[in-house]
């Protein structure tokens, strides 16, 4: 069984086709991650409609640029997540971004939101799905202050020294189709033990101009198996077990 643990399923125009294609290559579960106040409601809707989709809810750091009312809406977001806590399998996509977001004045609000989401994950005893781009040091410095069941670092491509910190702390790392061309993602795969690897599409983000879909994680698995010299069937079973450890509520 393949599981896409990080997908923006609410952003596809024709989700039925995306799901059909995913199932055809053995993808049986898709975690749809939230980014914005609006996306949270939509993800809950599609998770109710499709039994293959499971909601992970949170506020992405990019939302500070998109929503001028975000600060005043935070409490209502927390309330929605708490109200749906039985359905929610993780808090995500959350984190900090100092790479794509250049407006330094937004960083304090990013941090405030991130810490609120971590507190919520701690309270609800849920794992987190993290965005760390350009802010790896700050994210990794903050995390030990919280007691969270499991931490997954999504699409890690940052400095190697923080990758080593994450490995030492037994964080999980989800690998995207960028593995086919990104030296940083390849390094992550080579350094992280197979017991801490997960699969994700991050769809519908584009890879070399092609829209990402959950079906692509089959090829990601095959590439990882070649790089790490592990039989693909053995690796598939191992990653399924890893996913059960991190996201038990979807099983």
Image (tube, rainbow, N blue to C red):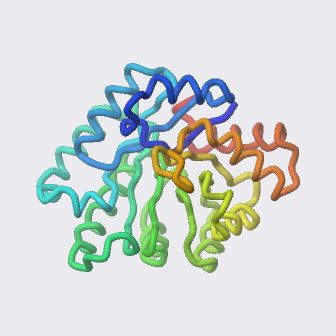
Q: Position of residue 109 (x, y in %)?
A: 23, 68
Q: Position of residue 30 (x, y in %)?
A: 53, 34
| Quadrant containing the N terminus in the rendered view | top right
| Quadrant containing the C terminus in the rendered view | top right
Residue 130's place in the image compared with 39, above or below, is below
- Of residues 128 and 105, the one nearer the viewer is 105
Q: Residue at x 39, y 62 (%)?
A: 95
Q: Residue at x 46, y 23 (%)?
A: 16
The answer to whether 86 appears left or right of 245 in the picture is: left
- Of residues 147 and 43, the one nearer the viewer is 43
Q: Residue at x 27, y 74 (%)?
A: 107
- Of residues 51 and 170, the one nearer the viewer is 51
Residue 87's place in the image compared with 104, above or below, is above
Res 3 quadrant in image: top right
Count of marks overlaid on the render:
0
Q: Position of residue 94 (x, y in %)?
A: 38, 56
Res 4 quadrant in image: top right
The answer to whether 11 appears left or right of 162 in the picture is: left
Q: Position of residue 39 (x, y in %)?
A: 29, 41
Residue 131's place in the image compared with 149, above or below, is below
- Of residues 76 and 28, the one nearer the viewer is 28
Q: Residue at x 62, y 41 (%)?
A: 216
């Amino acid at each position: 069984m393949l599981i896409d643990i990080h997908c923006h399923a609410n952003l596809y125009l024709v989700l039925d086709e995306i799901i059909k294609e995913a199932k055809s290559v053995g993808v049986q579960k898709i975690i749809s991650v939230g980014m914005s106040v609006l996306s949270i409601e939509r993800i809950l809707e599609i998770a109710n409609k499709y039994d293959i989709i499971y909601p992970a809810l949170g506020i992405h750091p990019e939302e500070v640029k998109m929503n001028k009312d975000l600060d005043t809406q935070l409490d209502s977001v927390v309330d929605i997540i708490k109200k749906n806590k039985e359905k929610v399998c993780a808090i995500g996509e959350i984190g900090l971004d100092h790479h794509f977001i250049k407006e330094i004045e937004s960083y304090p609000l990013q941090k405030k939101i991130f810490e609120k989401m971590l507190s919520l994950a701690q309270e609800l005893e849920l794992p987190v799905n993290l965005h760390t781009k350009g802010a790896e040091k700050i994210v990794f410095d903050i995390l030990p202050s919280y007691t969270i069941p499991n931490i997954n670092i999504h699409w890690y491509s940052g400095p190697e020294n923080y990758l080593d910190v994450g490995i030492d702390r037994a964080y999980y790392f989800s690998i995207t189709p960028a593995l086919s061309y990104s030296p940083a993602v390849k390094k992550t795969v080579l350094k992280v033990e197979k017991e801490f690897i997960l699969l994700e599409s991050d769809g519908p983000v584009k890879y070399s101009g092609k829209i990402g879909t959950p079906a692509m994680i089959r090829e990601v698995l095959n590439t990882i198996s070649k790089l790490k010299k592990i039989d693909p069937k053995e690796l598939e079973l191992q990653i399924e077990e890893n996913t059960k450890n991190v996201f038990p509520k979807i099983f």
